[in-house]
Image (cartoon, grey):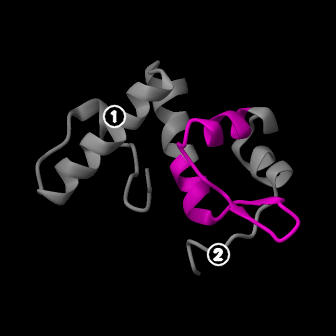
């Protein structure tokens, strides 16, 4: 499956992520995720967008971080993984393999 194919509408993405559509719009305003826009300007989220948002949610909901902290931790985890450095035990469950921030 193509992770970047824009297939999910705003309402479907919000339902999958169990969040309010306005929350996704806020994430977009903060450039945490930028969904594809159709010719009629409707948002379409890809599987990669959802994986990114799920990682952010795990850090904000599960670890108590704010959005800037979540973004920073994801970037740090990607650097650790790229350099094959072991992660801190509390952050081993955060999947950032396909996350794009």
Q: Nearer the viewer, residue 88 or 40?
A: 40
Q: Which mark is residue 13?
A: none
Q: Position of residue 74 (x, y in %)?
A: 35, 42
Q: Position of residue 41 (x, y in %)?
A: 83, 60
Under circle 2, the secondary element is loop
Asked whether 36 falls inside the magenta stretch, the response is: yes
Quarter of image, res 83:
bottom left
- At x 75%, y 52%, the residue is 13
Q: Is residue 34 above or below residue 28?
A: below
Under circle 1, the secondary element is helix
Q: Residues within 10 Å of mark 2 (few under 14, many from 20)?
A: some
Q: Which mark is residue 72?
A: 1
Residue tagged 2: 5
- At x 11%, y 49%, the residue is 85
73 lies left or right of 7: left
Tell me the quadrant of the picture where the N terminus can be found: bottom right
Q: Which residues are magenta?
A: 23-52
Asked whether 37 falls inside the magenta stretch, the response is: yes
Res. 61 visible in picture: yes
- At x 72%, y 39%, the residue is 25
Toward the right, the furthest residue is: 40
Q: Is residue 56 above or below residue 50?
A: above
Q: Position of residue 32 (x, y in %)?
A: 53, 43
Query: Which of the marked residues, 2 or 1, is nearer the chain's N terminus?
Result: 2
Q: Position of residue 82 (x, y in %)?
A: 18, 59
């Amino acid at each position: 499956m193509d992770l970047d194919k824009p297939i999910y509408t705003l309402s479907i993405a919000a339902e999958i992520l169990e969040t309010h559509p306005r929350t996704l719009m806020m994430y977009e305003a903060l450039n945490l995720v930028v969904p594809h826009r159709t010719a009629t300007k409707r948002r379409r989220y890809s599987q990669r967008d959802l994986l990114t948002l799920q990682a952010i949610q795990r850090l904000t909901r599960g670890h108590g971080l704010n959005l800037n902290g979540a973004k920073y931790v994801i970037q740090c985890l990607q650097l650790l993984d790229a350099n094959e450095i072991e992660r801190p035990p509390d952050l081993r469950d955060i999947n950032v393999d396909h996350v794009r921030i």
